[in-house]
Image (cartoon, helix red, strand yellow):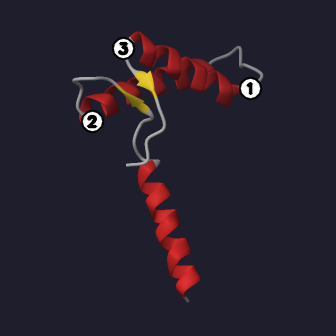
């Protein structure tokens, strides 16, 4: 029972960190980062899903999103909390 409870808590802790965008910028609050990320991700998804289609759409979408966020002054990082 303790193992299952520990496993559930670990999964919840990791899942809570995965809901935030993996970018940061000094002086910008979380709401601004989320709005910019949503905008960049949407533009990248639209580009990838418009013909001609790339060979690896997920990698291309991630690359386009990274490029857009860097243009806006963000640094990518791994965020847990």
Q: From the image, tell me which residue sits under label 3.
A: 73
Which is nearer the eye, 76 or 63? 76
Look at 45% across and 34% down and name the residue there.
Answer: 22
**Please, is residue 77 above or below residue 27 in the view?**
below
Q: Residue furthest top?
A: 71
Give coordinates of residue 81: x percent, y percent: 37, 49
Give me the disc on residue 30.
Answer: 2
Q: From the image, tell me which residue sits under label 1.
A: 56
C-alpha span from label 1 to label 3:
26 Å
C-alpha span from label 1 to label 2:
30 Å
Which is in the foreground here, disc 1 or disc 2?
2
Give coordinates of residue 68: x percent, y percent: 46, 15
Is residue 69 visible to the viewer in this orientation of the structure?
yes
Q: Secondary structure at mark 2?
A: helix
Look at 23% across and 32% down and name the residue there.
Answer: 29
Q: Please indicate whether residue 7 sits to the left or right of residue 55 in the image.
A: left
**Please, is residue 62 above or below residue 70 in the view?**
below
Q: Earlier in the sequence, mark 3 or mark 2?
A: 2
Q: Quadrant of residue 47?
A: top right
Residue contact between numbered discs 1 and 3, judged by CB atoms under 8 Å: no
Q: Earlier in the sequence, mark 1 or mark 3?
A: 1
């Amino acid at each position: 029972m303790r193992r299952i409870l520990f496993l559930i808590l670990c999964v919840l802790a990791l899942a809570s960190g995965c809901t935030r965008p993996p970018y940061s910028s000094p002086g910008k609050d979380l709401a601004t980062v989320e709005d910019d990320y949503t905008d960049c991700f949407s533009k990248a998804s639209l580009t990838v899903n418009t013909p001609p289609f790339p060979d690896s759409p997920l990698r291309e979408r991630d690359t386009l999103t990274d490029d857009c966020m860097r243009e806006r002054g963000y640094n990518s990082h791994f965020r847990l909390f």
